[in-house]
């Protein structure tokens, strides 16, 4: 019995010492209520208490009871932790927050658009009636290169973003991606030969690599914390929406002479919108801190990104303080850091998800949807591309259902 009382003294001392500063949560303290109540009821004055603890000295017994009273008083004390105020939901300036989200998300939309547009463009390029070129008769290998060349470019862009992203910053990286998107769309629209077509596809892929690296980082580091997860999920919806728009463009121009040029060239206006929008938006405040900028510059970026909500000086200062606190642990540690410590498990999970997505063949179905439906029996190119629109719409609807399914599952687990 003496051992049990001695063991109970250690957590009592810890809570007593730190409780005056209110740094322990209520849930952690609740486990001590029964003992504190037991002491308050006066059972310590009964003969049973004395009889059951014959090895406890009177001084040790008094010390134990005093600590029990301290725990009970701490349970009754008002909880005034300042972190509670910091976590209180604040009003969001939806106009500014929407702009902070929209321009980077369009960079993701252009990635999805390329998938849907390539589905119809491949049918248009390889058709004698609609190609408008004398090199329309492409072998399966050359047709495959039209599709995969953008993926090679995206891979190269991802590698480049790893080395250049933190030097350029999220904002300038997205502006670079917009320039690559726009230049590629222009080249593809005017491409007079197959090699230049592939060059434009690789260039577009480079834009995808940079955009898909910078867009989620910019949104996560700039948007208010209360809507951050929602906006990241919506960005994925923009990618799928881009796929649907690509299928719609295919259905619109697949029957026109040189229609594939219009499909690819239509990416130019959104690319210009991304560039203009990112030139106007502030830089990521977290990147400013990582790059050595002053705290005042980071607070200014937060105020601009939050719009009218940025008038809350205390909230802005708290946000920057959180960034300063987390930055040392989140700063890049080189390529080797990906394969060690806490990064290894997320890396394996993310890589596994990408592996299973690829080996199911789902991306191939999206890129070759129009050709697959045409080979399945749809006689005309227009019919095949219209069915692709149905596929894109269904994918968009199901993507929109995933956040709701996740929310319902979380509610059931509570």
Image (spheres, rainbow, N blue to C red):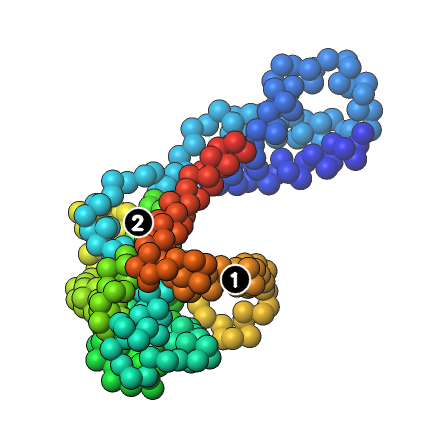
* Residue 122 horizontal/vertical position (percent): 35, 70
Residue 120 in view, yes or no: yes
Residue mark closest to the camera, 2 vs 1: 1
Query: To which residue does mark 2 refer?
Result: 224
Who's the residue at 65% across and 14% down the image?
42
The answer to whether 381 is drawn above or below residue 401 in the figure is below
- Decide which of tag 2 and tag 1 comes sooner along the chain: 2
Identify the secondary structure beneath mark 1: loop
Depth check: 344 or 353 in front? 353
Q: Quadrant of residue 93?
A: top left
* Residue 285 horizontal/vertical position (percent): 29, 62
Who's the residue at 25% across and 55% down the image?
102
The image quadrant where one finds the N terminus is top right
Residue 88 in the figure: left or right of residue 312: right
Q: Quadrant of residue 178?
A: bottom left
* Residue 213 horizontal/vertical position (percent): 38, 67
Depth check: 263 or 404 in front? 263
Q: Quadrant of residue 400?
A: top left
Depth check: 348 or 121 in front? 121
The answer to whether 139 is drawn above or below residue 115 in the figure is below
Query: To which residue does mark 1 refer?
Result: 361
């Amino acid at each position: 019995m003496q051992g049990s009382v001695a063991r109970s003294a250690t957590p009592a001392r810890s809570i007593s010492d730190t409780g005056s500063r209110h740094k322990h949560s209520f849930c952690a303290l609740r486990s001590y209520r029964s003992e504190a109540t037991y002491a308050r009821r006066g059972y310590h004055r009964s003969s049973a208490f004395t009889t059951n603890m014959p090895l406890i000295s009177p001084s040790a017994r008094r010390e134990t009871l005093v600590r029990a009273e301290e725990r009970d008083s701490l349970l009754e004390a008002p909880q005034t932790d300042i972190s509670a105020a910091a976590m209180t939901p604040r009003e969001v300036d939806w106009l500014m927050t929407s702009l902070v989200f929209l321009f980077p998300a369009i960079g993701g939309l252009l990635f999805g658009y390329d998938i849907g547009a390539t589905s119809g463009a491949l049918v248009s390029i390889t058709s004698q009636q609609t190609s408008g070129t004398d090199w329309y008769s492409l072998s399966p290998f050359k047709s495959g290169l039209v599709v995969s060349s953008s993926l090679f470019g995206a891979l190269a862009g991802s590698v480049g973003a790893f080395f250049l992203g933190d030097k350029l910053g999220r904002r300038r990286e997205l502006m670079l991606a917009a320039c690559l998107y726009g230049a590629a769309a222009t080249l593809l629209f005017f491409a007079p030969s197959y090699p230049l077509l592939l060059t434009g596809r690789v260039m577009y892929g480079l834009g995808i690599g940079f955009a898909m690296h910078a867009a989620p980082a910019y949104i996560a580091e700039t948007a208010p914390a209360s809507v951050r997860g929602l906006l990241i999920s919506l960005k994925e919806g923009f990618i799928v929406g881009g796929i649907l728009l690509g299928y719609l463009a295919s259905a619109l121009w697949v029957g026109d002479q040189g229609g594939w040029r219009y499909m690819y060239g239509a990416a130019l206006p959104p690319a210009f919108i991304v560039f203009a929008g990112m030139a106007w938006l502030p830089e990521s405040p977290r990147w400013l801190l990582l790059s050595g900028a002053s705290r005042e510059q980071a607070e200014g970026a937060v105020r601009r990104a939050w719009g009218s909500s940025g008038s809350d000086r205390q909230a802005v200062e708290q946000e920057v303080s959180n960034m300063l606190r987390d930055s040392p642990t989140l700063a890049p540690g080189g390529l080797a850091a990906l394969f060690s410590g806490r990064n290894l498990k997320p890396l394996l999970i993310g890589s596994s998800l990408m592996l299973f997505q690829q080996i199911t063949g789902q991306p191939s179905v999206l890129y070759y949807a129009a050709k697959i439906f045409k080979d399945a029996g749809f006689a005309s190119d227009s019919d095949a591309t219209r069915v692709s629109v149905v596929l894109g719409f269904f994918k968009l609807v199901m993507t929109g259902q995933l956040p709701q399914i996740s929310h319902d599952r979380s509610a059931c687990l509570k």
